[in-house]
Image (cartoon, rainbow, N blue to C red):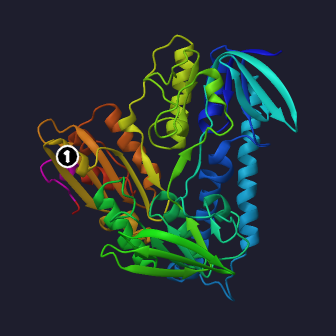
Amino acid sequence: MNQYDVAVIGSGPGGYVAAIRCAQLGMKTAIIEKYDTLGGTCLNVGCIPSKALLDSSHHYEDAIKHFEEHGIDIPGEIKVNLKQMIARKQDVVDQNTKGIEFLMGKNKIEVYHGMGSFKDATHINIVKDGKTETIEAKNIIIATGSKPSTLPFIKLDKERIITSTEALKLTEVPKHMIVIGGGVIGLELGQVYKRLGAEVTVVEFMDRIIPGMDGALSKELMKVLKKQKMQFNLSHKVKSVERKGKEVIVKADNKKGEEVTFTGDYCLVSVGRRPYTDGLNAEAAGVKLDDRGRIAVNDHLQTNVSNIYAIGDVVKGAMLAHKAEEEGVLVAEVLAGQKPHIDYNLIPGVVYTWPEVAAVGKTEEELKDAGVDYKVGQFSMRALGRARASMDLDGFVKIIADKKTDEVLGVHMIGARCADLIAEGVTAMEFRASAEDIARMSHAHPTYAEAVKEAALAATADRALHA
């Protein structure tokens, strides 16, 4: 029987990063993955393929709508080759998963393909093609991730009534895609198919889209997406989804309690994700789950069984790849006797629509509820020379700071390249910067990042220079 210092169950961003860090710290490490490719949801059917399609569809939209304004004439008809677009997406996925395989070899991590489940607290059974192999590990890290959620009354046929997994490999552009859920995944994939020619209708239970983010971002993003001809039905409670041939009929009650019917050829069910522990046999190791089906852990991500840890989507907190990575590193360093920490308030969130949406820290709503005295500085992307040059005029940067100390409490932005710009906010808050600290930093001109400086100036006695 092969023995290891650490065995990681699951090879998504949390799992493979945990394995690499364990190996770097001198531990003999194994990783177990139920599928044939490494990388988990993020690399195979999540973050990476969705960004590939977002980029491809963005290029198409630019070609048909904006190139002429830039003085670029393309003779003839510009067409979508969906088959090639999906193939390119898969090529991007394959390159990334091969990169993970390389890293496993480089770090001398033993890779097992098969369904991993607990035999007991130190032994894992790995089942592949009907054959079972058992390995032993002093410490085990559960990194089994999550799966798309649905509603109890919805029967997913994975053909017309689909999740994000199927939406990444459609063979035709929908005529009318109904998206149930106005969160990150629904909006990103909805925008992909809107750009490619589909009519897109979003049906959301809450009274705003991206409900977990600052209200100003929600309002601005919906305004922009409406301008792009996406349709929104907020405060609608879906009560049935039926397929009739090539039609999908969605019925919902609006905020007045009136029944509303939506008819399309595809329905994307995007109502969040659930922790994935199916087949793990956690009870055999004595590992406890909480009331929401997550693995229960303490502040060190240790379960109730002292040598077993859990990270990523399978534990509490935001279901984000970069959060899982940080947790994977933390557990590895705890096992090595170090004293790492994670500030969960400084884990940024991003929506990869265009314009991009990004945020870190507290929202205005959270600060109001907590009774914190704060001030706000906001600056429009439209006022930037760089934004006018690129014609990416939508959005703003908003900085929230403590009214007495000027310490930055939250950074919220929507606009071009905000997914990258948010790192400036994270860095500033990690070092407990004040709004004035950011305002006094030199920002290259012309850049989108100047909006961050201007928002900080606006939060510092309303000193924005270009507003």
Q: What stretch is highlighted in magenta?
A: 456-465
Q: Residue furthest bottom?
A: 76
Q: Is residue 84 visible?
A: yes
Which residue is at 40% across, 76% downward?
Answer: 226
The reply, left or right, for residue 287 in relation to residue 300 is: right
| Residue density around tag 1, few if under 14, some if 14–19, many if 20 or more, within 10 Å | few
Is residue 228 inside the magenta stretch? no
Q: Which one is nearer the viewer's eye here, 49 or 155?
A: 155
- Coordinates of residue 337 in the picture (x, y in percent): 52, 10
Disc 1 element: helix
Q: In this view, does 183 lie above or below 124?
A: below
The quarter of the displayed image where residue 140 is located: top right
Which residue is at 52% across, 22% downward?
Answer: 303
Q: In this view, does 63 lie above or below 467?
A: below
The quarter of the displayed image where residue 357 is located: bottom left
Residue assigned mark 1: 369
Which residue is at 47% across, 40% downward?
Answer: 292
Q: Which one is nearer the viewer's eye here, 410 or 292?
A: 292
Q: Is residue 45 above or below residue 310?
A: below
Q: Which amino acid does label 1 sit on?
A: Asp
Say which quadrant the N terminus sits in. Answer: top right
- Coordinates of residue 321 in the picture (x, y in percent): 55, 42
